[in-house]
Image (tube, rainbow, N blue to C red):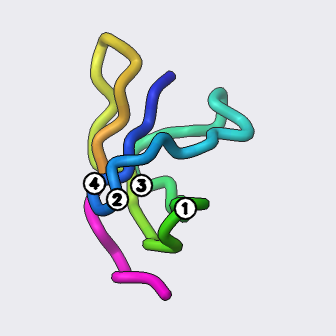
Amino acid sequence: MKAICPECKNEIEIKDPQNISVGTIMECNTCGITLEVSNLDDNGEIKFEVIDEGK
């Protein structure tokens, strides 16, 4: 599973990929932005909506 932050374009570390679903809230460990999973595609890519602009 691959997750890229839409803000800083860095890869987001996914600690437990089995528990990721639409609506899961995550934080980018690089820029601190809060994201909500909006889509999981068939290629294992995760799409996000920005919830909070971060630190």
Q: Does residue 24 show up magenta in the picture?
A: no
Q: Nearer the viewer, mark 2 or mark 4?
A: 2
Check the image and name the residue furthest to the bottom.
55
Q: Position of residue 18 (x, y in %)?
A: 65, 27
Q: Residue at x 50, y 22 (%)?
A: 1
Q: Nearer the viewer, mark 3 or mark 4?
A: 4
Disc 3, SS: loop
Q: Residue at x 63, y 39 (%)?
A: 14
| Callout 2 touching callout 1 (CB < 8 Å) | yes
Q: Dot 4 corresponds to which residue? A: 6
Upstream in sequence: badge 2 or badge 1: 2
Mark 2 and mark 4: span between their CA atoms? 6 Å
Upstream in sequence: badge 2 or badge 3: 2
Disc 1, SS: loop
The residues colored magenta run: 49-55
Q: Give left or right: position of 20 versus 48.
A: right
Q: Residue at x 60, y 60 (%)?
A: 29
Q: Dot 1 corresponds to which residue? A: 30
Disc 2, SS: loop
Q: Position of residue 36 (x, y in %)?
A: 39, 60
Quadrant in the rendering for residue 2: top left
Quadrant in the rendering for residue 6: bottom left
How many other residues sit within 10 Å of disc 4, few (<14), some (14-19) or many (≥20)? some
How many other residues sit within 10 Å of disc 3, few (<14), some (14-19) or many (≥20)? few
Q: Dot 2 corresponds to which residue? A: 8
Mark 2 and mark 3: span between their CA atoms? 21 Å
How many other residues sit within 10 Å of disc 1, few (<14), some (14-19) or many (≥20)? some
Q: Position of residue 26 (x, y in %)?
A: 54, 59
Q: Is residue 44 above or below residue 15?
A: above
Identity of the amino acid at label 4? Pro
